[in-house]
Image (tube, rainbow, N blue to C red):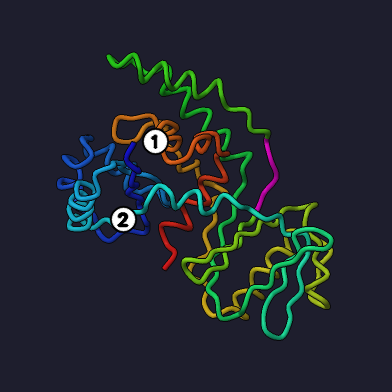
Amino acid sequence: MSEPFLLLSSPPHDELDIADLGPIFGLSAAEVRVKANYPSSTIWFASSDLSELQQTARQLKSAGAHVRIIKGKSLTVLSRRHRLRRFVFEDDGMRCYVDADRSIQIPYSWSAAIVSGRPDQMETVDRLTLRQTAKMSSRNKSIRQEARSALADIKEPLDESFVDFYFYELPKVHRFTARPGDTEFSGLADKMKPVVHENIAELTETIGKKFKAIRFNQTMETLPPPRPPFVSGKSLNKILDETEPGLGKVGTYDLSSRFAFLAEAR
């Protein structure tokens, strides 16, 4: 089976021509505004035909949208998600400990990107979206059935807030996740605070000062998850599983973070 390519939105967009976007999406003007005004990266189209997606991308760009095409396989490169246990800012790089004895040093010459989120809020909206899709009055019974199946398959526990730190010098990427209760902040030295979320904010600020470039710092705390049940008329879980078996079962917030990084990383 051919590898799927994904066309991701990459907001913020320029001034959008809603009339031109309508036929591309096959949506009404009101529906296009909702879709185009979504402030986080999400999948707009998927196809194994790269030339077809490139043509769609050109049309979207001419209408003012910012988009990016990625290989579906790019999502699997980010599958390794290290828990950031502790860290030390050394002279030539940041040493990140993933367990008591194992560490990875990231040179300050690399770029960094930061994505934060509140999975409990995100998953709640994801369930609501699927529930509405499952109940919608549609002539396409298979869409309703797949939505109900996807809803039944959600077994993600509600989780705490997280921050994903992506350090990269493409094609090399290291991804670390800091969570309350998981990460020890003594590496902040005299800047360490008594409140976990203040320590995460201090860590983010310090990384911004020490690394070559912070490409973006995106928060998904108040957003619904950029994980539509269906893309280009096909179940997103099927598209993901065609990329790599089991990828369709990746957690909502994990996948959302990957979209955000891949839409912006340069």
* Relative image position of residue 54 (x, y in whole percent): 22, 53
Q: Is residue 183 magenta?
A: no
From the image, tell me which residue sits under label 1: 239
Residue placed most toward the observer, 84 or 170: 170
Rounded to the nearest angstrom, the CA distance separating label 1 from label 2 is 19 Å
- Vertical relation: 82 (above or below) 128: below
Judge from the rendering whether residue 235 lies leftward or rightward of residue 160; answer left or right. left
Start-end of magenta stretch? 158-162
The amino acid type of the residue labelled 2 equals Val
For the stretch drawn in magenta, the main secondary structure is loop
Left or right: residue 56 compared with residue 131: left
Q: Is 130 on the left-hand or right-hand side of 48?
A: right
Label 1 environment density (alpha carbons within 10 Å; few <14, some 14–19, many ≥20): many
Label 2 sits on residue: 67
| Residue 223 position within the rendered picture, expressed as x and y whole percent measured from the top left | 51, 45
Element carrying mark 1: helix
